[in-house]
């Protein structure tokens, strides 16, 4: 006959309870009673209904502490185990919500708590966006206004950057895995400097793909910084919390990801003025030093005149070198400014080019393969636009 110690029995019961999949991931509804807080901040209470009650403990609660009060009706999440010291069965609680909270909201709060505990929302790990991106990746639906809005902003602000679209579904049963795959695909391209994840507004159900764990972990693992622009400004998804930067709209995300070309042109002109001013000051100071040295050498021997002549030659050489360097800098800045102006969409249109878009969605037409007979088009030229039909 085997005889066991009390500790052995308690440990066996604990292992059995914690090995049960249902009891390890449990939602329970009931009324709070006998609430007490320890000096360390832990919460001890009972959750009960008309027939039964269960002991509960919640260690160092943060966001959920205000939902706990005697008599409050709650839905809590946790795991059932046994406290071996007293042999008491209790629920180890990690999330508390008010009774009546919808199932989706409960799932969302549970995942938020889990990811926050793992550090995915930590602000210290969020990265700054590159100031002058060469390639900007976009994860969104290939149809609809979101992609068009991002394209329009980038063409206006910073046409030097190349837009790389990784198309995905943004709603539906498989949307979360599609979004994660699209993010991973962009991160396999070494040239991508920043990624925009975007979709338009919608209900909690419509935006749910951006609250899935697969999307959160893909954003967290992204090599390139991620800007999230999901839903309206009042919608906050898990993708927003994990991303390096959150934008209120897709258009705002494009503005955050790229600099303004007109401001860059002004900055170049300002840098040119600063360089000329510094070079002129250096030349003046060196000339003053040479003149002072020449005065000290006057009358000091038969070789003074030769040394003074050599100093004059060195002075002239220095001045010539400075002006050559200044002219090269001026030409370089002027070249950059001309490139920026040449890339201005308005300048391109004045040279006889046109922008062709679909009338029913605004998508750019870049190839004859994108249109069919009788398609309605909108053609924009330098002084306006007009409609056309494919014949």
Image: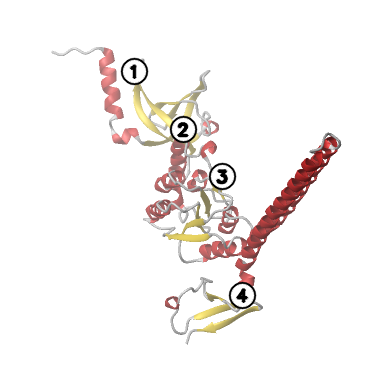
Which marked residue is nearer to the observer: mark 3 or mark 1? 3
In-front residue for pair 122/202: 122
Which marked residue is nearer to the observer: mark 2 or mark 1? 1
For disc 4, the marked residue is: 349
**Left or right of 300 in this view: 155:** left
Query: Image quarter for residue 10?
Result: top left
Which SS class for mark 1?
Answer: loop
How many angstroms separate mark 4 from mark 3 (CA)? 35 Å
Outermost residue, bottom side? 391
Task: Say few, some or many: other residues with alpha carbon within 10 Å of mark 1 (under 14 / 14 to 19 / 20 or more).
Answer: some
Which SS class for mark 3?
Answer: loop
Task: Say few, some or many: other residues with alpha carbon within 10 Å of mark 3 (under 14 / 14 to 19 / 20 or more).
Answer: few
- Sequence-wise first label, 2 or 1: 2
In-front residue for pair 279/106: 279
- Sequence-wise first label, 4 or 1: 1
**Left or right of 70 in this view: 18:** left
- Against 232, is 285 above or below? above
For disc 3, the marked residue is: 128
Task: Say few, some or many: other residues with alpha carbon within 10 Å of mark 4 (under 14 / 14 to 19 / 20 or more).
Answer: some
How many angstroms separate mark 2 from mark 3 (CA)? 46 Å
- Against 195, is 96 above or below? above
């Amino acid at each position: 006959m085997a005889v066991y110690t009390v500790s052995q029995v308690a440990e066996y019961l604990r292992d059995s309870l914690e090995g049960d999949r249902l009891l390890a991931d449990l939602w329970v509804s009931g009324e709070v009673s006998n609430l007490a807080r320890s000096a360390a901040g832990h919460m001890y209470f009972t959750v009960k209904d008309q027939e039964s009650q269960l002991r509960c403990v919640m260690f160092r609660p943060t966001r959920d502490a205000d939902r706990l009060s005697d008599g409050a009706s709650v839905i809590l999440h946790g795991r059932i185990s046994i406290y071996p010291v007293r042999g008491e069965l209790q629920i180890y609680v990690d999330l508390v919500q008010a009774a009546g909270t919808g199932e989706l909201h409960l799932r969302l709060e549970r995942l938020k708590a889990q990811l926050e505990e793992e550090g995915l929302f930590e602000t210290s790990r969020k990265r700054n966006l590159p100031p002058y991106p060469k390639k900007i990746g976009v994860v969104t639906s290939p149809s609809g206004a979101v992609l068009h809005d991002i394209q329009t902003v980038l063409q206006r602000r910073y046409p030097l950057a190349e837009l790389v679209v990784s198309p995905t579904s943004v709603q539906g049963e498989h949307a979360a895995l599609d979004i994660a795959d699209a993010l991973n695909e962009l991160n396999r391209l070494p040239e991508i400097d920043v990624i925009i994840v975007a979709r338009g507004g919608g209900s909690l159900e419509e935006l749910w793909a951006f609250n899935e764990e697969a999307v959160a972990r893909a954003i967290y693992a992204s090599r390139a910084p991620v800007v999230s622009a999901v839903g309206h400004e009042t919608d906050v998804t898990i993708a927003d919390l994990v991303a390096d930067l959150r934008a209120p709209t897709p258009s705002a995300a494009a503005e955050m990801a790229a600099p303004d070309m007109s401001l860059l042109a002004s900055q170049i002109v300002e840098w040119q003025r600063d360089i000329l001013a510094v070079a002129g000051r250096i030349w003046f100071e060196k000339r003053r030093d040479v003149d002072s040295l020449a005065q000290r050498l006057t009358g000091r021997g038969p070789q003074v005149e030769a040394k003074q002549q050599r100093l004059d030659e060195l002075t002239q050489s220095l001045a010539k070198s400075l002006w050559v360097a200044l002219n090269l800098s001026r030409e370089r800045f002027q070249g950059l400014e001309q490139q920026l102006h040449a890339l201005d969409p308005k300048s391109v249109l004045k040279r006889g080019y046109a922008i062709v878009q679909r009338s029913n969605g605004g998508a750019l037409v870049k190839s004859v393969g994108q249109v069919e007979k009788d398609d309605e088009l909108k053609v924009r030229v330098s002084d306006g636009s007009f409609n056309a039909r494919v014949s």
